[in-house]
Image (cartoon, rainbow, N blue to C red):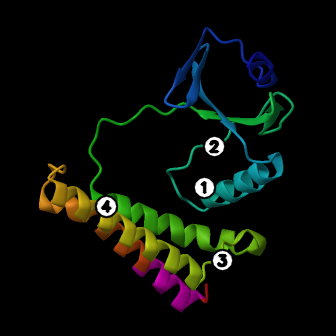
């Protein structure tokens, strides 16, 4: 860990693991140090894409903090490490409408950026849809078994949630395959 911290040029007064991220306090600055199993090259491509989206005006992406050498990724301990400024969780409530609107805005800005990297596009075919339908069927079967045995104590509304989630995902896959040719 210290090899990574020193690469960023930090002399921290506090290092804590919080929610899967290392919180680093260095003077009056606070950073989130994150580890990844992804190859360094993929993280550089991701960084480039996110910076383009951020530069295009999407306000909800944190910049990556460069190391003392100007790199954005540190390879150490068999992992890749990158850092962002620390962002505390907001106490404010964000409505589903605001969240959906923000996600839609992100997609509008990110679409032309992603188009620059055709090799990264995930191809979805009807086999993927069939796999999801099988999962939906299996979950429905398990739920029915639990209800028959009287094990489940959940309400009928809660019982529908996983099935509805799969149905929503399957409809999304169908729409994607039909409109984008997979």
Give the image location of residue 96, x and y in percent.
29, 59
Residue hosting label 3: 123
Q: Are marks 4 and 3 in contact (CB under 8 Å)?
A: no
Give the image location of residue 67, x and y in percent.
79, 31
Whether residue 28 appears in this view of the structure is: no
Q: Nearer the viewer, mark 2 or mark 3?
A: 3
Element under label 4? helix
Magenta part of the chain: 171-180
Residue hosting label 1: 54
Give the image location of residue 136, x and y in percent.
38, 70
Q: Nearer the viewer, mark 4 or mark 3?
A: 4
Residue hosting label 4: 142
Which circle marks residue 63 in the picture? 2
Q: Looking at the magenta stretch, what is its main secondary structure?
A: helix
Element under label 2? loop
Query: Mark 4 or mark 1, which is nearer the start of the sequence?
Result: 1
Q: Are marks 2 and 3 in contact (CB under 8 Å)?
A: no
Q: CA distance from mark 4 to mark 2?
A: 44 Å
Q: Is 114 drawn above or below residue 176 in the view shown?
A: above
Q: Is 47 drawn above or below residue 79 in the view shown?
A: below
* Residue count near mark 1 (Cα–Cα under 10 Å), binned few <14, some 14–19, many ≥20: some
């Amino acid at each position: 860990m210290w090899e990574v911290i020193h690469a960023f040029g930090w002399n921290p007064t506090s290092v804590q693991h919080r929610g899967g991220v290392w919180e680093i306090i260095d003077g009056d600055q606070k950073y989130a140090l994150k580890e990844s199993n992804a190859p360094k090259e993929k993280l550089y491509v991701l960084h480039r894409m996110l910076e383009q989206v951020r530069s295009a005006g999407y306000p909800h992406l944190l910049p990556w903090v460069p190391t003392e050498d100007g790199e954005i990724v540190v390879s150490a301990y068999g992992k890749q490490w990158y850092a962002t400024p620390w962002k505390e969780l907001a106490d404010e409530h964000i409505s589903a409408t605001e969240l959906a609107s923000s996600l839609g805005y992100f997609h509008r800005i990110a679409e032309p950026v992603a188009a620059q990297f055709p090799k990264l596009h995930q191809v979805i075919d009807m086999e993927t849809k069939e796999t999801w339908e099988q999962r939906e069927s299996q979950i429905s079967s398990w739920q029915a078994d639990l209800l028959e045995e009287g094990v489940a104590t959940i309400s009928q509304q809660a019982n529908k949630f996983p099935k509805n989630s799969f149905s929503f995902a399957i409809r999304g896959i169908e729409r994607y395959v039909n409109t984008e040719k997979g």
